[in-house]
Amino acid sequence: MISIGKIKIKAIALGFLVDTAGSFFLGIILGIILTINQVKQEIYSQDIYYLILSLIIGFGFTCLGGYVAGRISKDSQVLHGGVVGGLGLIWGVILYYFFPSPIPIWFHVISYTGLVPVGMLGGDLASKQLRTLKEK
């Protein structure tokens, strides 16, 4: 597996893919459901319930991506999870720069500050599971 120091590129790439693709597709499904319920974009981009649900979904996939990266790497799981979260942060800032949205700034602050710790949490969960498997 190709690596840069302790970081294994394949593990990071697959973890980031899980995070990004999962968030994207579930976001589309959520948007379709809201559209079917005849909720306009201007309304649900400011709706607190939609925003909180979006945070939960996004953090859930970041945690899953960190977990996948940690499991594939088989060592330095928390580091790999954190890198997945860091890539998510960079990707989010790039998207916001090129496609500004009417979403409130508090949403971006919570989202950006939570990505790396949530990714690390996923890596930590992978680490604990691998430790449990080794003990058996």
Image (cartoon, rainbow, N blue to C red):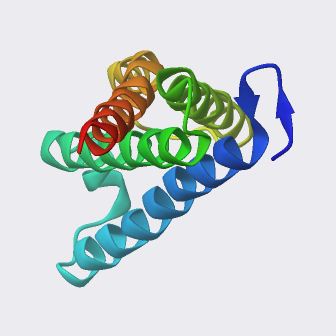
For image coordinates 37% across by 67% down, the residue present is 26
Judged left or right of residue 3, residue 131 is left
Q: Residue furthest left?
A: 49
Q: Position of residue 59 (x, y in %)?
A: 34, 39
Which residue lies at the image location 67% right of the left edge and 28% below the top edge? Answer: 90
The reply, left or right, for residue 60 in relation to residue 82 is left
Where residue 22 sits in the image (x, y, percent)?
45, 62
Q: Position of residue 85 (x, y in %)?
A: 53, 30
Classify the position of the C terminus by image quarter: top left
- Classify residue 8 by image quadrant: top right
Give above or below for 72 relative to 29. Answer: above
Residue 40 or 98: which is nearer the viewer? 98
Q: Is residue 101 above or below residue 76?
A: below
When asked about the image quadrant of residue 29, the answer is bottom left
Q: Residue at x 44, y 30 (%)?
A: 119
Vertical placement of 113 versus 22: above or below? above
Q: Position of residue 54 (x, y in %)?
A: 30, 48
Q: Which residue corresponds to the image point at 48% horizontal and 49% vertical from the top-left?
A: 68
